[in-house]
Image: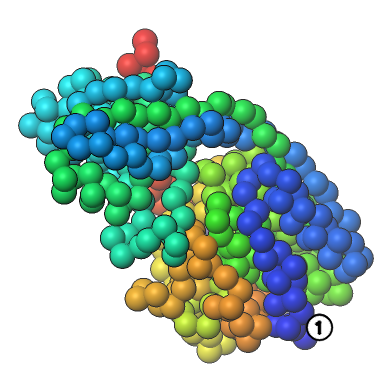
Amino acid sequence: MKICGKREFELLEKMSFVRMGGTAEEMKAAEILMDEIKAIGLEPVLEPFEIEDADLVKGELEVLEPFNKKYTVTAYKLSESTPEESLVAPFYYAENLTAADMEYAKGKIVLVNSLTLDNYRKLLKSGAVGFITMSGTIIETEENSDLFTRTLRGTLRKFGNMPGANIRVTDAFDIVKNGATKVKLTAVNTPVTRTSHNITVTIKGTEKPEEVVSFGGHYDSVEFSTGAHDNAAGSVINMEIARYFAENPPKRTVQIMWYGSEEMGLWGSKAWVRDHEEELKNHLCMINTDMAGVVIGYDVARVIATKEATAHCDAFMKRKGYNVGVTQEIYSSDSIPFADKGVPAVNFVRFGHHVGGTMIHCRYDIKEHLSAEALAKTTQFVLDYGVELVESVVFPFERVIPTEMVEKVDKYLMKKEEAEAEAEKK
Ligand SMILES: [Zn+2]
């Protein structure tokens, strides 16, 4: 089979709509993928899982003193709602949550530059009554950008909850510059449980069916984004790989997976490893493709496995003459839950040029920045590398996650903080 970038691009065009986890649009994308899988002659398995989400009811910030002006905000999903009639409090801009900042934040609605877990814990400790984060850039306007909705993630909520909202950085600039001292915040949301889906295709190995190599990537997007680069691209690359193995029966079992709700916190891959825990001991490697296809960019492989596995991948790329920078490193994507369960993972990523060859997680992640040629180029080495693993006489590396990678994965999953939250409760 010859890799066909044009065919990949056509499938990507079909998926060119916003596909947020747990929505009807994500399901529509799943159906498009399943139709294609069936057309190849393979049998897709659709697996539902539940995700935590919220419906937004209301978001507004009104400055009451020393001037009066209303600003649009979005309520933080899963944050405590303000009373319907809103929360009135003094306003304070806590630039970096120093000890002094914490002293001044008490009883106030506090604007922060970023809401790391560390910052959030300081806010809770300070006695602030609400928080506001900013998104976007200072050059954006209402016409050329969108105001994002954010979620107060589970790990943060374990430490406590308070009303929160997100505002455009340009509006935050206006509020701070004009010296707001008293505000009225209305941020109301209703928690809901939604259903999202993973799609799995299994092609049984002819010689070592008990050993599994999987290819994966998420197919959902964030709000306002058609997620062409991130990650319709990885989805169509995996379809091309499915096509190859349908025509060329593999020695080891190949599984190809399209994960839902990655953008909301790796829900799909977390659900998969939870629901298939028994099978994971036979899982020798997970190959994840998250972001590809951009014309202006560069390819890397991030290996969450041993130094030997990393060297093997690097040597493979060099021997074949592929332009792929290989490092032993974690990557924020569906490979994390697998690595956490001891499955070596290799992430293929085509990043955009750092000065803006592409833009993800916004309305500008569009198919126009991608090409069939760029898709085919990445597909070639993802497939080649995959075939190397699937067909090798002896598997080239051990199913081991070394200590230094375990530490990084644990840190990423905030395990220490989760334990601290548990301890605080007791
Ligand atoms: Zn992604």
Which residue is the site of mark 1?
1
Number of marks drawn: 1
Q: Where is residue 260 in the image (x, y as percent from the top left)?
A: 66, 48
Looking at the rendered structure, the kind of residue marked 1 is Met
State the image coordinates of residue 81 (x, y, percent, origin top left).
Answer: 44, 23
Q: Can residue 286 be seen in this view?
A: no
Where is 252 relative to 296, above or below? above
Residue drawn at x 65%, y 53% as measured from the top left: 19
- Residue 87 percent coordinates (x, y): 34, 22
Q: Viewer-proximal residue, 340 or 125?
A: 125
Q: Which image quadrant: the N terminus? A: bottom right
Considering depth in this image, is 315 or 198 the residue closer to the camera? 198
* Location of residue 139 with respect to 24 vertically, above or below: below
Q: Residue shown at 59%/42% (left/top)?
A: 267
Ligand 1 located in image quadrant: bottom right
The quarter holding residue 316 reads bottom right
